[in-house]
Amino acid sequence: MSAGPPPTVAYRRGSEPRLVSWTSGELQTRTVGAVRPKLLVALALVVIGILGWLDFRTGSDLGFSLFYLVPTVATARWVGRRPALLVAAAASASWFAADFGARLGTFNVGISLWNGMTRAVIYLSLAQLVASLKEDQRALATMNERLNDLVLRESALARTDPLTGLANARAFLEELEREQARARRAGTPLALAYVDLDRFKAVNDRFGHAAGDELLRRTGAILSASVRAGDLVARIGGDEFAILLPYLPDSAADAVVSRALENLREKTLDYAESVGFGASVGLAFVGKELESGESLLRRADEAVYVAKAAGRGRIVRARLESPPA
């Protein structure tokens, strides 16, 4: 069997590096993060061994007890509580062995025992403290992430219609203001369609509110499927929807809204035949004059009343403003 490629390290955004090895012609993966703690603990123990040897060689002339804190704190900071306590215990034992060896043959062994105990308490306490601080930091970071998720979720819910999953009136008006400012600044067209369902109350009265809610959800899905990906469909009232159509000149906006209205007729034919269900649409365009989003929406709403008065189930353009040249 031929040998495969040598192990490599693969990186992917949002995940830890992974060691990739070749075994029996198949790629096997192993997380680098699982190997690193063991290497850090081994390195800390090696450093402690070197410090103990230096302590023994220099005797009581030079003290290295402060330097034992470095591998102890590093292990607590980067690896965890249990490995840090192990390293702290090793540091205490190494310092005691060096001091005991330097005092061997004298009458100061009790001093070594006492000093060893005090350093053990210091090293173990420091390891415990640093590990606890690290765990608290991680817990705080996790809590902050959850809070951020909750804030984002609440923000999304505040701008989403709970029945249809579409944008609500608040989200629609915010987007409308942004798109209006962009359209006036860039001189590009922007259309707004106000969709008011016809005889929706008759659906509720005859088939019940559950059927009415299902019809609203169906209407939202039909309108969303009838427009472009960049267009915004929102439910802004009980049986009222709005569609924001950026970058569309008046003739193209007419075609898109006509297609949406036709799709709604075809896919709600059961209700149309039973109670005369349908939709009337008012279509407004951003003009050259400065106008608020609410004003544009009001003009489209006024056009809806004209459509209903003319017999329902049709599209009427709003008056006063004209699309930008």
Image (cartoon, grey):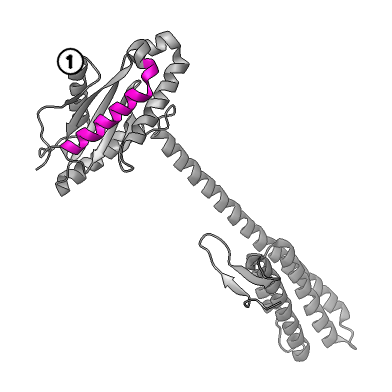
Residue 298, percent across and down? 20, 26
Q: Nearer the viewer, residue 180 or 246?
A: 246
The N terminus, quarter of image: bottom right
Q: Main secondary structure of the magenta part?
A: helix
Q: Nearer the viewer, residue 139 or 266?
A: 266
User: In the image, what residue occupies the spot 62% across and 77% down?
Assistant: 5
Q: Is residue 163 above or below residue 33?
A: above
Q: Nearer the viewer, residue 247 or 46?
A: 247
Residue 153, percent across and down? 47, 39
The magenta span reads 251-271
Residue 309, percent across and down? 19, 14
Based on the picture, tell me whether residue 263 belongs to the magenta stretch. yes
Residue 13, percent across and down? 50, 62
Q: Classify residue 61 as left or right of residue 196.
A: right
User: In the image, what residue occupies the spot 65% across and 63% down?
Assistant: 130
Query: What residue sits right under mark 1 in the picture?
Result: 310
Q: Residues within 10 Å of mark 1 (few under 14, many from 20)?
A: few
Q: Classify residue 158 as left or right of residue 72.
A: left
Q: Is residue 275 above or below residue 126?
A: above
Based on the picture, tell me whether residue 272 belongs to the magenta stretch. no
Quadrant housing residue 184:
top left
